[in-house]
Image (cartoon, rainbow, N blue to C red):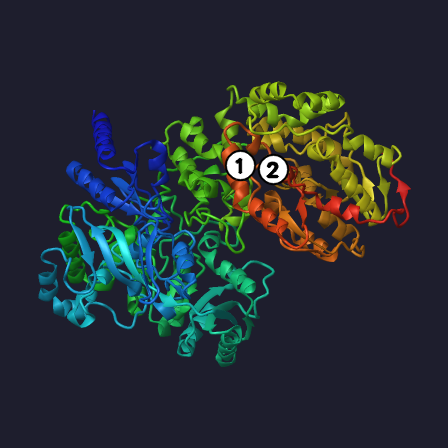
Amino acid sequence: MAERETEAAATALATALRAAVRGEVDFGAAARALTTMDASNYRRVPVGVVAPRDAEDVAAALAVCREHGVPVLPRGAGTSIAGQATGVGVVLDLTRHLRSVLSIDARARTAVVQPGVVLDDLRDAVRTHGLTFGPDPSTHNRCTLGGMIGNNSCGAHSVAWGTTADNVSELSVATYGGAALRLGRGWDGAPPGLRELVERDLALLRTGFPAGLPRRISGYALDALLPEAGTDLARAFCGSEGTLGVVTEATVRLVESPPARALAVLGYPDESAAAEAAAGLLPYGPLTVEGMAEDLVPAGHRLPRGGAWLFVETGGASPAEARAAAETIVRAADALDGTVVGDPAGQRALWRVREDAAGTATRMPDGSEAWPGWEDCAVPPARLGAYLRDFRALLAQHGLRGTPYGHFGDGCIHVRVDFDLLSEAGVRRFRRFSEETAHLVVAHGGSLSGEHGDGLARAELLPAMYGDELVALFGRFKDLWDPEGGMNPGALARPARLDENLRFAVLPRERVEVAFGYPHDGPSGGDFSAAVRRCVGVAKCRVAGPGPGADVMCPSYRATGEEQHSTRGRARLLHEMLAGEIVTDGWRSAEVKDALDLCLSCKGCRSDCPVGVDMATYKAEFLHHHYAGRLRPAEHYAMGWLPVWLRAAAPFAGVLNAAARLKPLAALAKRLAGIAPERTIPRLAQETFGPWLRRRLGNRTGVFRPGRSAVLWPDTFTEHLSPSVGRAAVRVMEAAGIGIVVPPAGRAGRLCCGLTYVSTGQLDRARTVMRRTLDRMEPLLDLGLPVVVLEPSCAAALTTDLPELLGDDPRAARLAASVRTFAQALEECAPDWRPPRLDRSVAGQTHCHQHAVLGDEADRRLRERAGLTGELSGGCCGLAGNFGFERGHYDVSVACAEDQLLPSVRAAARGPRPAELLADGFSCRTQLDQLGGHRARHLAEVLAEGLRDGPAEGPAEGLERP
């Protein structure tokens, strides 16, 4: 009965909201599931989501919710780390429509923005004026101004430009009670009774807040209302975490952005030494003083000598001036070693390491999980070194591990700790540690939060910092703004307990039966719940478009702008599928299937996500279970079984190619196969690669050159659709003196990586195909030869999917370790070979699977030696194997291509000389051809064209068939 009443109330609320607002109202399971969590340890279930179109919509939604007695949570990008962006009631999604920069006044150095404006969009808009918005969290390319105001966000440059509160001039606010307020300096716009509350407690407000803290974010900023502080209502509202009202518009201050910057990188023995040095660098006027230790730095780094580093940025009117300032800091610093990085690309690469730390810190060096919870306290900068030593000792006392990093110049520390949040004993230890660390921070004169707010993680502990009397005053302050308690209840004022609402509590404790091995998830691998837990919500996948050094992840989000089509959104839906509270159909879930439908399986998240969420694998796993015992879509049978159909079609290639040119026949074939009608069916090779290669080798199984031989893998795409790539690769390998060995395929074409079966979730069939492949490859594995795979997607499948599906077969790991790209094989087997000098510019794309799994360093070096200059674009071509061919995916496929690939190709075409278009993947080449008639080639084809005819160098002998 109660459940039916709750459903009826939700239905009535949704109906009333749809009648009142012009924006979208969604009370479906998917919308609710997508907003249960932020980037914290916490989870709260809303009743629905509203995306208001303007301030009037916000007011109307608040009025309906007030009438129905339902609380409201304003939400931006959902990257909050303390849980304040989770909530019960109705979530107001301010990112969908309220995302405009309304005006810029360059002379006054101000801008008027809506709350859903992404920070980088504002910075791009004011860059032409030589201005920027000072605060810049590491999530700058997806966090919103409204969220920054709610959390009083800071970022790396706060030593120069302060917090968000320091850079806000005026705010327009809608309250739950129906008031529309304009807040700035002075008492105008204050709710009734606020001035009296402040004047009655002046003594408490003057003495209750710790002094000397550049990063005091905890609690409400009531001291901003003191007369000597200028009675700044806008500043007092900042950091209120959506508990007082909804920001509908903000006037923000801008600062001059130095035209040139340089980065001093200083090495110290350990993090405490770096922390103690940070405060001494502040008199030199740096823009940033950031710190991190070696356990967060990727292997193979080229940082100065040391175990911890300070990144100190300087600015200037010219590169020389900025560099001189950085060199002064290096000379003045008492560091083990130091260097100055002046080129922008080098600086971006270093800042990326720092910005990704919020994600990389969630995995300890041994692969165990680490979580926020004591994420961002701050102490006076001069106390930071001593605090870190005491903090490390407290970690050890509790048997915990963590990796501190952060804004050392402001005394603000981020850390992820390996809390056990799955067991009752672990949660109890989490609570005890949090309580003791709160007292430690206070003992050092610090703030429980130095950047991300209190939320659910620390608000309960505020009495340790402020005392009961001031915390009670916080409660009265909230009541004046929100007397009905409708704004984000449970956060900041009258908070929930810090060990309630933990997002892991709803996950199953027993292992979920899965097909993939998930070797890096769970104590012994194979834990799908642990794999899904990887997503911590930092939302690097929620970047709207390409930028400097743009990655592959996440092409479908870039195409649609919808949370459910981001890596994070899909991970959230899988989390809720396992929880079973909102998404109740398990593996049969329509919500999860719909979200995964537009996943291109590009594998970009495997490398670009800071915590290595692997959505391509999760999608294959889901489809495997979703269709178990059920009829699959036509495209799964058509494109999933592509190797079989291509082998069967090979003898009839000429007839089938002619039939595909007849529009009625082609349309019928596409309809039956589930292929998008906009697509052209690729031509089949008149002569497949295998017969040509056998003739080339004189019907031997290969040509063996001691120490310079490799197995050439006969992938399906090269064999049947682009044999010219294989022929070119053979010519180049022969010219380089590399002996070519042919795998023993048995019956024609029976060797397969299983890629098409994996991408359509036919994992039982994939394992059968892979085991047969291992049986035939085993004799060659014993020779220890590299295996050259020309198609990047097949190489990635052999490298990752094969060992993760057949973890019980040691041959799988051996074959995976043998796989080489074409460029890697040339570098390994013929290191002294000099490719033909081509001296031309290139454009095109690095295959997304190569970017994510294989790396392109060898390709870059090979192109450089051949005189092929220019950069290939990132992103995904949008065809992505079967994805772009499937019915219903064409528009998204085109949008993905338009994100990076097609613009880069068009730009290259406008150059003084035509650029050579490179695309090693068959999908990439097909997409370029079908969307613009662009002819791209594999790198092997370009090199082969530049070769002089002549015999291969070096001794050769026949290799008998194993």
Circle on res. 893: 1
Q: Can residue 830 be seen?
A: yes
Specify the quadrant that holds the C terminus: top right
Distance between the alpha carbons at the discs numbered 1 and 2: 9 Å
Residue 333: x %, y % from top left: 49, 78
Q: Can residue 783 be seen?
A: no
Q: Amino acid at mark 1?
A: Ser
- Count every numbered label the image shows and give the total: 2
In the rendered view, tell whether residue 428 sits above or below residue 392: above
Q: Is residue 163 left or right of residue 245?
A: right
In the rendered view, tell whether residue 267 sits above or below residue 722: below
Residue 935: x %, y % from top left: 67, 41
Residue 81: x %, y % from top left: 36, 52
Q: Nearer the viewer, residue 476 or 595?
A: 595
In the rendered view, tell whether residue 376 sits above or below residue 338: above
Check contact, mark 1 vs mark 2: CB within 8 A: yes
Specify the quadrant that holds the N terminus: top left
Q: Is residue 390 left or right of residue 515?
A: left
Circle on res. 166: none
The residue pinned by badge 2 equals: 927
Q: Is residue 856 left or right of residue 142?
A: right
Where disc 1 sits, the SS reads helix
Q: Nearer the viewer, residue 915 or 407?
A: 915
Q: Please rate how many residues cluster around mark 2, counting C-alpha atoms within 10 Å: few if below 14, some from 14 to 19, many from 20.
A: many
Q: Amino acid at mark 2?
A: Gln
Q: Please rate how many residues cluster around mark 1, counting C-alpha atoms within 10 Å: few if below 14, some from 14 to 19, many from 20.
A: many
Q: Nearer the viewer, residue 888 or 776?
A: 888
The numbered mark, 1 or 2, whose residue comes first in the sequence reads: 1
In the rendered view, tell whether residue 336 sits above or below residue 499: below
Residue 414: x %, y % from top left: 40, 60
Where disc 2 sits, the SS reads helix
